[in-house]
Amino acid sequence: MSRADPGLFGPNSASWQVDREALLVAGGTCALLMQLAHPAVAAAVAQHSDFRGNPFGRLRRTLTASYAVVFGSTPRAERAIRRINAIHGVVSGRIPETGQAYHALDPDLLLWVHATLVDTALRVYERYVAPLSPTAGEAYHDEARRIAIRLGVPAKVVPPTLVDLRARMAQMLGSGEVQVSPTARMLAPSVLYPSRVLPRLLWDAAHLISFSVMPDAIRAGYGIPWPAARERGMRRVAAVSRRVLPLLPAALRHVPHARAADRRLVQA
């Protein structure tokens, strides 16, 4: 390994291009609510975490681990992957609505969590940052696919293309395998209104980017209204965002982890 350790991906990767954008954090609510829409994920979060009392903590841990894998040095990325696998290894229980047993290392469960992160990141990027070519989108999927396999999803379970991944997500939603359960609805307010310091109106505004890229079925399952006027408004927001973002300096536009990775390579 050279002194200029690019980590698992490096500056020419689709992952560095997409995940460096700070605006993608605005899609966090979408990813979290989509994950909770899987009844087993909702059960695991309710039974094995302090999510309701500290939703920011879970989001912060998720982002820290994700950025370590994407932008960290190879040793740091490897440590993050081992940590995630160790946590998943002890999470199991039963879904309260059905009594069905679950384990966090179940391939379909891991695939759903992986898919929500990939799909949400790409939807936010393409709508609010810049269009992506089909080749770039597939490259992002392929890079994320390699990490999913490292996190326990069997290679044969991860769809080979982004189109196939989204088709699998649609199938899971259409079949009812993924649907918003009472447990998910119980947890949702902790995602939507994690602090009483801000009024609900401001929280609702903060979630608009997430709501705009969320599948209709999941929005409806949580009872989130999405009238046509709001959709038109967010299309205007997206158009402005795509024009303004290229004018911002990296210190405002890119996440600190990406800037630190850039410095690591320059200073080596």
Image: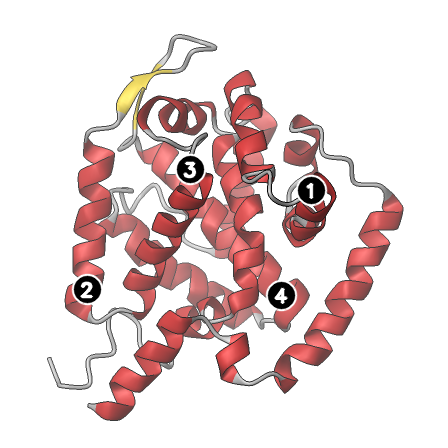
Q: CA gap, disc 1 to disc 3? A: 18 Å
Identify which residue is drawn at 49% across, 45% down: 116
Q: CA gap, disc 1 to disc 4? A: 30 Å
- In what element is the residue under mark 4? helix
Residue lying farthest to the left in this orientation? 1
Residue 242 drawn at (x, y percent): 69, 74
Q: CA gap, disc 3 to disc 2? A: 25 Å
Left or right, 92 with reference to 144: left
Mark identifier at residue 76: 2
Residue 115 drawn at (x, y percent): 46, 46
Q: CA gap, disc 2 to disc 1? A: 38 Å
Q: Which residue is mark 1?
A: 199
Q: Disc 2 residue type?
A: Arg
Check contact, mark 1 vs mark 4: CB within 8 A: no
Q: Disc 4 residue type?
A: Glu
Quadrant in the rendering for residue 265: bottom left
The answer to which of marks 3 and 4 sits earlier in the sequence is 3
The answer to which of marks 1 and 4 sits earlier in the sequence is 4
Q: Which residue is mark 4?
A: 126
Mark 3 or 2: in front is 3
- In what element is the residue under mark 3? loop
Left or right, 112 with reference to 253: left
Residue 234 drawn at (x, y percent): 78, 57
Identify which residue is drawn at 39% across, 51% down: 60
Q: Which residue is mark 3?
A: 54
Q: Disc 1 residue type?
A: Pro
